[in-house]
């Protein structure tokens, strides 16, 4: 056991059994130096300084767990941001899976060694051309061609033999640095490389044949959509052809998605020569590791469960090759193909809740498309899959310091209910009565709106407008401030009830940061203060309470067994979650896959968000981007004016000494 707690007697239920919910939580040692281990090197000292800043602690041991010290989803994002600003190449997935300074430092040291390039690889353009010429008996010329997005490398050869291209890519991979791997291998002098990768064609500049091809593009995209759908139908049938090995119940959050289905998923961009067989093996390993990738929903007597199949010995990854199209035509095809793949509804029963397709854009660029139903996938799942797929593909054997669990282990834990906290304690500590009063006023105020039409818009704040204020406020704090200022003005209320989105993957000493699934929870937070730079104190305590007491709010809302044990909190939470909840979600840095998926046209039914207001923020290198989705029709000009006033107020507050 990790801890021992001495009791005079064991608490019992009315039936004479041990009342596990009444057992007290262990108290950790109070001495600040208990178990303290100092940083061993410069990297660990840098990480310790960052942890102390983000967690607000004077001293941090290199073996203390980030999340057990009060870290949560927002603080993890802050830590990554500050680390990157300090030149430390830290990603959110690394913080989630390596939660101590020691393990993070060891990981970063391994990565540093792994990224040192083999000195035998050719890095000089002329030497690479010479090696290709001598090895394959051809004339070779490497040429960089740029468009608006990035540089493409063309290898022009003479004489050109199509059957030699595959042999060339294998040889180039083992002898030439990856930065000199060509995107295209073409006959010398026969291709206008700049036109092939251009994205600036207009219809007036096109030939009659090109204009005819452009008019036919919708038909071709439909053909690709049908082809990909057939490949995924075969994938679905093959993975479900084996006998069921076990069943387990749905997580509480998944019951929400039964009523309000939504799309999710990710895109994994591979900028390298891909061995499809190796990649297929890596995908199979992911299917083996994550049971939701081989599970289907079944309903018997009104009870929903997951039905799990074994991992097949062999799989065939659906692949499509778009490399025959110029870049401009690829950019016309992809949005149509991806919109269908990501937003086409899933069959609710007897169907996998995801699709998969590898898209080849050229010799070097590939997209692994992984659309999923939100019922099996959250934002952290994207990080998990991306990291684990590349590890499997590269055969890296890095030690995993964090134990991972199957999704059904998480479901079992959550459905047990909160630990060591009463119904009344939940109501009081989360101010649920005041939360209810404020949310009810908002619901009554907006009852007459036109819910047949939804409203979505984007508000952007340039980062230099924030940075010139010379304050230490984080972007998550500023997003909360803008959210408070916006909604307090919009609803004319001094208190704003928000459902704060958090990872929901840490409960006491157990975490699920290495697993795919829908783990997200929404924590009710009542924002009241207006003149503060930071809302950290407003959200830190409820987040700590949720983690330490295994408190999952979706469980209190959707798990019928909780009604008798937590009648007051369950009733208030369920009522408020059903009447126009305001969901706040800080996503951190906007990654490349997010930009690609964000550019797709989401169906209006999905954009409506199941009757909720969504306030999401993310940042790029230059802007803080806030997305607002309202499930009813609203005057966009009025919304922009309120955003402007809210932003000006926040920026003014940042300049006032606290």
Image: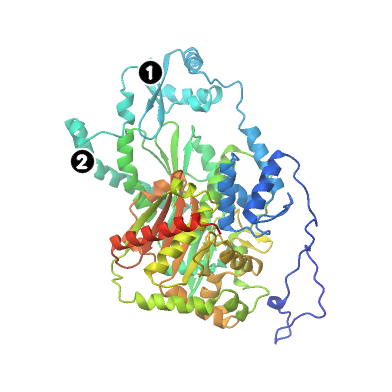
Q: Furthest-bottom residue in view?
A: 14
Q: Quadrant of residue 19?
A: bottom right
Q: In the image, 212: left or right of 197?
A: left
Which disc number belongs to residue 93? none
Q: Report, in whole angstroms, how far the alpha carbon at label 1 lies from the one at label 2.
A: 32 Å
For residue 187, what is the image quadrant? top left
Q: Is residue 283 left or right of residue 541?
A: left
Relative vertical location of residue 207 with respect to residue 562 in this rendering, above or below: above
What residue is pinned by disc 2? Answer: 215
Left/right placement of residue 531 relative to residue 648 reads right
Report the quarter where the N terminus lies. Answer: bottom right
Mark 1 touching mark 2, by CB under 8 A?
A: no
> Is residue 456 in view from this perspective?
yes
Q: Nearer the viewer, residue 107 or 222?
A: 107
Q: Nearer the viewer, residue 261 or 444?
A: 444
Query: Which quarter of the rendering shows the C terminus?
Result: bottom right
In the rendered structure, the answer to whether residue 534 lies left or right of residue 344 reads right
Percent position (x, y) of residue 62? 73, 49
At 30% from the left edge and 63% from the top edge, which residue is drawn? 638
Q: Is residue 590 above or below residue 606?
A: above
Q: Secondary structure at mark 1?
A: loop
Q: Which residue is mark 1?
A: 160
Q: Nearer the viewer, residue 263 or 579?
A: 579
Residue at the location (40% across, 28% down)? 152
């Amino acid at each position: 056991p990790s801890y021992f707690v001495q009791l005079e007697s064991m608490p019992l239920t009315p039936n004479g059994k041990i009342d596990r919910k009444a057992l007290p939580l262990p108290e950790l040692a109070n001495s600040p130096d208990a178990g303290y281990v100092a940083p061993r090197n410069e990297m660990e000292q840098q990480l310790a300084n960052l942890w102390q800043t983000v967690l607000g602690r004077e001293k941090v041991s290199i073996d203390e767990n980030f999340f057990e010290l009060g870290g949560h989803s927002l603080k993890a994002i802050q830590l990554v941001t500050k680390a990157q600003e300090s030149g430390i190449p830290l990603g959110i997935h690394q913080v989630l899976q390596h939660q101590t300074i020691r393990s993070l430092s060891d990981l970063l040291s391994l990565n540093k060694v792994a990224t040192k390039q083999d000195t035998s690889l050719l890095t000089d353009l002329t030497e690479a051309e010479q090696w290709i010429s001598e090895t394959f008996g051809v004339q070779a010329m490497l040429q960089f061609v740029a468009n608006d997005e990035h540089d493409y490398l063309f290898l022009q050869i003479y004489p050109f033999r199509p059957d030699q291209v595959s042999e060339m890519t294998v040889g180039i991979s083992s002898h030439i640095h990856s930065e000199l791997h060509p995107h295209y291998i073409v006959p010398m002098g026969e291709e206008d490389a700049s036109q092939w990768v251009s994205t600036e064609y207009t219809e007036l500049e096109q030939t009659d044949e090109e204009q005819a091809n452009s008019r036919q593009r919708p038909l071709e995209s439909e053909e690709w959509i049908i082809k990909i759908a057939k490949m995924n139908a075969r994938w679905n049938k093959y993975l479900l052809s084996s006998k069921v090995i076990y069943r387990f119940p749905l997580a509480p959050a998944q019951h929400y998605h039964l009523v309000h289905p939504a799309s999710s998923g990710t895109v994994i961009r591979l900028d390298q020569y891909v061995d499809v067989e190796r990649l297929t093996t890596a995908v199979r390993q992911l299917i083996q590791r994550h049971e939701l990738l081989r599970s289907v929903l079944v309903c018997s007597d009104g009870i929903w469960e997951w039905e799990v199949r074994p991992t097949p010995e062999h799989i065939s990854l659906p692949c499509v090759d778009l490399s025959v199209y110029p870049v401009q035509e690829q950019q016309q095809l992809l949005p149509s193909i991806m919109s269908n793949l990501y937003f086409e509804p899933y069959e609710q029963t007897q169907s996998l809740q995801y699709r998969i397709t590898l898209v080849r854009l050229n010799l070097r660029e590939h997209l692994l498309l992984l659309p999923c139903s939100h019922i099996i996938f959250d934002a952290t799942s994207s990080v998990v899959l991306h990291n684990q797929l590349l590890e499997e593909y590269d055969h890296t054997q890095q030690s995993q310091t964090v134990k991972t669990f199957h999704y059904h282990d998480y479901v079992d834990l959550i459905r047990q209910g909160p630990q060591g906290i009463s119904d009344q304690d939940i109501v009081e500590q989360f101010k649920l009565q005041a939360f209810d009063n404020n949310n009810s006023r908002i619901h009554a105020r907006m009852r007459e709106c036109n819910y047949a039409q939804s409203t979505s818009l984007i508000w952007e704040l340039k980062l230099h407008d924030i940075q010139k204020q010379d304050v230490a406020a984080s972007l998550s704090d500023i997003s909360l401030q803008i959210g408070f200022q916006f909604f307090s003005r919009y609803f004319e209320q001094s208190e704003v009830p928000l459902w704060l989105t958090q990872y929901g993957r840490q409960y006491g000493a157990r975490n699920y940061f290495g697993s795919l699934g829908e783990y997200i929870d929404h924590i009710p937070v009542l924002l009241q203060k207006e003149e503060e730079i930071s809302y950290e104190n407003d959200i830190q305590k409820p987040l700590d309470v949720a983690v330490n007491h295994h408190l999952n709010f979706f469980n209190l809302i959707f798990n019928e067994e909780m009604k008798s044990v937590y009648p007051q909190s369950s009733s208030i939470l369920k009522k408020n979650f059903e009447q126009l909840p305001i969901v706040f979600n800080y996503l951190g840095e906007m990654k490349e896959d997010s930009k690609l998926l964000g550019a797709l046209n989401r169906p209006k039914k999905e954009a409506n968000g199941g009757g909720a207001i969504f306030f999401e923020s993310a940042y790029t290198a230059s802007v803080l981007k806030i997305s607002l989705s309202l499930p009813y029709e609203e005057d966009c000009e009025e919304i922009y004016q309120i955003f402007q006033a809210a932003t000006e107020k926040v920026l003014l507050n940042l300049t006032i000494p606290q």
